[in-house]
């Protein structure tokens, strides 16, 4: 048997209601904040992610699905959405649109990671990006959107962790302070972090190895090294969050794994879904558009992993049922009745009603069993006499009440079936 590739998933009809519920909620919340959907290619030039996400990141160094096409072009399946959205803006002349520009996407992404609960190689994100606003009010608005989404999905046990990683002005001095600190402890660091000392010492701060995280506890903190502008930005963001009643904690170990971030970074962490507990992460990236060849344009956003949202919803006791019940199931006896039922079903569907009749030649008993399984709200049986009189008993399956109806009066039937 051919199996799906490791780290991918089949999303089956029995689970689809939850996915569709999350997608619909995400779209509704995004619309409430004035965000429009954007779609972009599943694969891009490899260079986009090398330059956008950053050459020293784990994503670019170890996790990309990169290939050459038949003409020898270097392409990569998108590991995330932000770099692609930035490219889209530049390529389509949208950097001079009316700002702020607010965009959202629902996409699949690809990263060659070790699969485990909440982590797969093909995974799904809901992401939002807001461009052209450098004020902390934009950070607050994006965080409020994330907060609203999580609340509307019924997820309970989460905490919001925020940090500032400074800007190109203040980060070099902080980076040096951090490097000095970790160099003094370098013998004990894990092999990955030894490598990070030169390339990206900030990432040592969120290493999950017990020894590294113990050492990181006493490391210099970004927020103690911020330049006055970055400090003011952080203070203002805190003021906005307090104004909106959104609880948060300053977590100096949140540094994020992608290179484009500056100033605000944040994560929503679920306390009860295991090791892959970051359900949503994001931050500000004021240099990205310029780095990719566009004008200087501020940006901030986040992405949430759909499977992690599902895990968190399950832990919060949220159950989403498939509520697409047939309004009517018509059971039939004999060829003529079956043909007549096809006509009635077709008329009802034209009126926007979900109706079904037998397609596989079941016995009457088996048809009723099927209607029951599909949780049909009403059933009716058409046999010879019903066919002759064009009347039948319409049975309400929820309370067993029966009503005789005129089979040719689709208007009345529609009225009964559409009433709640
Ligand atoms: P990220 O932290 O790499 O950020 O991913 C965002 C979210 O995607 C994570 O918090 C997690 O929920 C989910 N995720 C990441 N990797 C996996 C995986 N292998 N399996 C399942 N879920 C996963 C970004 O992607 C940024 N583009 C977010 C952003 C948008 N920042 C600014 N704008």
Image (cartoon, grey):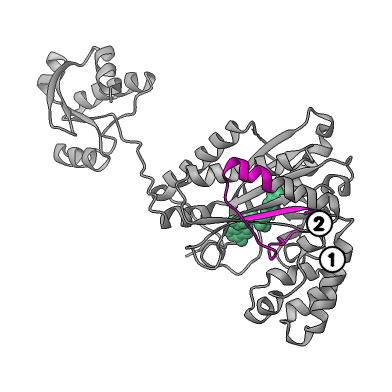
| Residue 141: x %, y % from top left | 66, 40
Whether residue 87 is visible:
yes
Residue toward you, 152 or 408: 152
Label 2: element kind? loop
Q: Which mark is residue 166?
A: 2
Q: Residue at x 54, y 42 (%)?
A: 148
> Magenta region: which residues?
238-267
Q: Residue at x 55, y 56 (%)?
A: 159
Q: Where's the C terminus, which quadrant?
A: top left
C-beta proximity under 8 Å, tags 1 and 2: yes
Label 1: element kind? helix
Q: Residue at x 82, y 62 (%)?
A: 225
Whether residue 122 is visible:
no
Q: Is residue 261 on the magenta stretch? A: yes
Nearer-N-terminus badge (1/2): 2
Quick check: 215 above or below 338? below
Distance, label 1 to label 2, CA atoms, is 9 Å
Q: Is residue 134 on the magenta stretch? A: no
Quick check: 108 above or below 30? below
């Amino acid at each position: 048997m051919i199996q799906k590739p490791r780290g991918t998933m089949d999303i089956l009809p029995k689970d689809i209601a939850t996915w569709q519920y999350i997608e619909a909620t995400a779209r509704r919340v995004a619309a409430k904040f004035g965000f429009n959907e954007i779609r972009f290619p599943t694969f891009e030039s490899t260079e986009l992610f090398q330059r956008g996400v950053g050459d020293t990141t784990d994503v670019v160094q170890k996790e990309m699905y990169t290939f050459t096409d038949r003409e020898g072009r270097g392409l990569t399946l998108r590991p995330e959405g932000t770099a692609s959205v930035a490219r889209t803006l530049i390529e389509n002349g949208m950097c001079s649109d009316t700002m702020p520009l607010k965009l959202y996407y629902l996409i699949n992404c690809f990263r060659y990671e070790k699969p485990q609960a909440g982590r797969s190689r093909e995974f799904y994100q809901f992401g939002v990006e807001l461009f052209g606003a450098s004020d902390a009010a934009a950070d607050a608005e994006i965080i409020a959107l994330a907060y609203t989404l999580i609340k509307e999905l019924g997820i309970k046990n989460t905490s919001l962790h925020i940090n500032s990683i400074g800007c190109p002005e203040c980060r070099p001095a902080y980076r040096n302070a951090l490097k000095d600190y970790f160099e003094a402890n370098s013998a004990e660091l894990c092999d990955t972090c030894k490598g990070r000392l030169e390339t990206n010492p900030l990432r040592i701060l969120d290493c999950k190895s017990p020894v590294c995280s113990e050492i990181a506890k006493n490391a210099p903190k970004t927020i103690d090294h911020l330049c006055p502008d970055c400090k003011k930005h952080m203070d203002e963001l805190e003021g906005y969050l307090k104004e909106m009643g959104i609880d948060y904690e300053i977590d100096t170990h949140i540094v994020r794994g992608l290179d484009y971030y500056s100033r605000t970074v944040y994560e929503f962490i679920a306390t009860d879904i295991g090791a892959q507990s970051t359900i949503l992460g994001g931050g500000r990236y004021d240099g990205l558009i310029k780095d990719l060849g566009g004008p200087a344009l501020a940006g901030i956003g986040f992405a949430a992993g759909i499977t992690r949202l599902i895990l968190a919803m399950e832990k919060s006791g949220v159950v989403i049922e498939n509520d697409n019940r047939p309004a009517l199931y018509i059971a039939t006896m004999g060829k003529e009745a079956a043909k007549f039922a096809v006509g009635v079903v077709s008329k009802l569907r034209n009126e926007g009603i979900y109706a079904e009749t037998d397609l596989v030649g079941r016995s009457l008993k088996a048809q009723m069993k099927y209607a029951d399984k599909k949780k049909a709200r009403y059933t009716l049986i058409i046999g010879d006499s019903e066919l002759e009189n064009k009347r039948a008993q319409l049975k309400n399956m929820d309370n067993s009440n029966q009503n005789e109806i005129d089979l040719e009066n689709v208007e009345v039937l529609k009225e009964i079936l559409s009433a709640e």
